Amino acid sequence: MARVSYRELVDTFRGVLVRVGFTLDRADLCARLFADASRDGVPSHGLNRFPRFIDMIHLGVIDVSATPLRVASAGALERWDGRRGPGNLNAHACMDAAIGLSRRHGVGCVALSNTNHWMRGGNYGWQAVDAGVIGICWTNTLANMPPWGASDPRVGNNPLVIAAPRSEGAVVLDMAMSQFSFGALESYRRRNELLPVPGGYDNSGELTRDAAAIEASRRPLPIGFWKGSGLAMMLDIVATVLADGRATHEISRDPLHETDLSQAFIAVNPAALGDGNALAAVDRIVDDLHAMSGAASAPRFPGERTLQTRAKNLTEGIPVDPEIWEAIRRMDRQ
Amino acid sequence: MARVSYRELVDTFRGVLVRVGFTLDRADLCARLFADASRDGVPSHGLNRFPRFIDMIHLGVIDVSATPLRVASAGALERWDGRRGPGNLNAHACMDAAIGLSRRHGVGCVALSNTNHWMRGGNYGWQAVDAGVIGICWTNTLANMPPWGASDPRVGNNPLVIAAPRSEGAVVLDMAMSQFSFGALESYRRRNELLPVPGGYDNSGELTRDAAAIEASRRPLPIGFWKGSGLAMMLDIVATVLADGRATHEISRDPLHETDLSQAFIAVNPAALGDGNALAAVDRIVDDLHAMSGAASAPRFPGERTLQTRAKNLTEGIPVDPEIWEAIRRMDRQ
């Protein structure tokens, strides 16, 4: 695994994005959002995802020049149309709008229709906490998970992000409703490793820890069986209603044409209540977790490793898959 | 299992509540909230929970005369102090406040500190959808679940409720972060049945479907292993920060002294955006789910059985555990 600097990563992404038609400032933000994912240890939605993002631009699925448009507004609630623009730029704009609303109204909720894959959802959680507010956001996806009791993938794994600032860093949960993402299944298969817990069903309908069997059946397991299935449905429902957008079952099942997604972004600003101390509870909860004795391994809070990974990668360089990195560099030179 | 009418249930609860010091109107609402849980098929947080509720009043943990007080406000965000009043009345008042905020601001968020167990969380989801809005609420609890990687119960199973109106009824998710509640574990043990999926660890640290073994170890499984553990932590963090209240680790582990909980109530009013049709998406999603072929059993949406159960119980009477019902009737005559 080679390592490259954050600067080099951003410059290369930006170069490619300008070549495919982005304006310079939009290319810069889009490049940073991709680089941030790799920098924080999520290359599946950073560098490794960049080639498919470019493919979807060439296919006309993602419109590089489309900017999100606010189409309805009622105080602290807004509805935006993503107009099939780049998913990460749309999501960033909507979390920004939600943060702005939370500064004026204490809480802000922005729903977004007709957008594309937001790549790494955690980015928008960090965006909220970097602004000093609590962020909650989620997206629907194409149908990639059978609802509980069925074998046909009819619901999305609909990632949910919840983020809260703390004195040093943040607590950022970024989780899909499937026990493992297809990206994670692929990694286990390539390493020839069994999953640590059952991750789905094989073709005969048995729970299995064999990643390849789950990839073959397309039956990943919802977290908590019926519970994650129900939560995924609710997230789809709320995002779709608020955005007046498309639900999972109305989205193309072809990954290269997964578009017109619906998303929701909520920001809550505890400082608006005038008590500067309320956020201290985050540190108290983290401290209690770390004080646990008798744990097999030290329990961690969501996103705990992110800042260490980020610091290491900024110092030593960000790990890149050499083949993918070379392919992207070639795009930048063509 | 005997059956009694909704009216009789409410009258009896109300009678007992007035005897322990409730004013008549507060007794009436509190009685209805308990009866609604049994009516909708959740007796564990209806009739069956009523005796412990009365015990906690006698112990001085629940203050029957305390009303929740708004202590801070910023536009669409409010913070209320529950002052150890009855948990279901406090929760009902705060969801009501959130609904009111959502009518004025599109979205409303109310956080509540120093409250008691809200009993059946789904009630506040139904309260939101009965008002035509989307409701999202959650509570922390005493520590009753080990975080992922540990064996000591240090996080709560922190139930989460998400509810959306549909043309006929609603979709209402009401789920704790443990795979099974302790109430469910008890039911399986009494019926001498294995759990349908692993529900926790036995005392030797092995995953098990034996409910009694999990009751003995006090190690119920978070949904999705590390994922439900992380989500439970986040729900605790956000409710505690917004309420400026107590976190799970600061709450007594004695069930009879489980008090000073923190909760969050969010209401979103899609009608504020002027599009009366957005809620039609809920019916589209439900219809798609029901149209699924090849399912082992028909997939259901969250809360799908509630309205059937409610209708049946209103017609045939609400099932009651005869012993518990007699004990409560005796309280009403004493």
Image: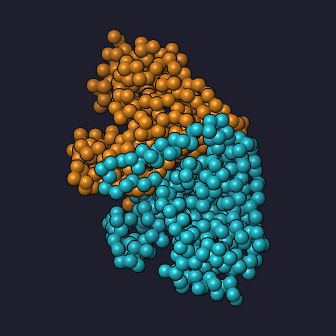
Chain colours: A orange, B cyan
Could you tell me which residue is drawn at 54 percent across and 42 percent down? Answer: B280
Give the answer, above or below, for where A302 lies relative to B143. Answer: above
- In the rendering, at what x and y percent does residue B183 appear? 48, 71
- In the rendering, at what x and y percent does residue A311 appear? 46, 36
- Location of the C terminus of chain A by quadrant is top left
Give the answer, above or below, for where B180 lies relative to A37. Answer: below
Give the answer, above or below, for where B212 lies relative to B122. Answer: below
- Residue situated in front as seen by the camera: B243 or B35: B35
Q: Quadrant location of residue B24? A: bottom right
- Residue situated in front as seen by the camera: A52 or A319: A52
Give the answer, above or below, for where A314 lies relative to B195. Answer: above
Q: How many marks?
A: 0
**Observer able to see residue A292:** no
- Location of the N terminus of chain A by quadrant is top left
Could you tell me which residue is drawn at 39 percent across and 53 percent down? Answer: B299
- In the rendering, at what x and y percent does residue B3 appear? 54, 78
Q: Quadrant location of residue B202? A: bottom left
Query: Does residue A297 appear to the left or right of A125 in the view shown?
Result: left
- Residue situated in front as seen by the camera: B171 or B88: B171
Q: Residue furthest top?
A: A334
**Observer able to see residue A62:** yes
Q: Residue furthest bottom?
A: B334
- In the rendering, at what x and y percent does residue A176 appear? 42, 44
Q: Residue furthest front?
A: B315
Could you tell me which residue is drawn at 34 percent across and 32 percent down? Answer: A254
Could you tell me which residue is drawn at 73 percent across and 42 percent down? Answer: B104
Query: Does residue B79 appear to the left or right of B249 in the view shown?
Result: right
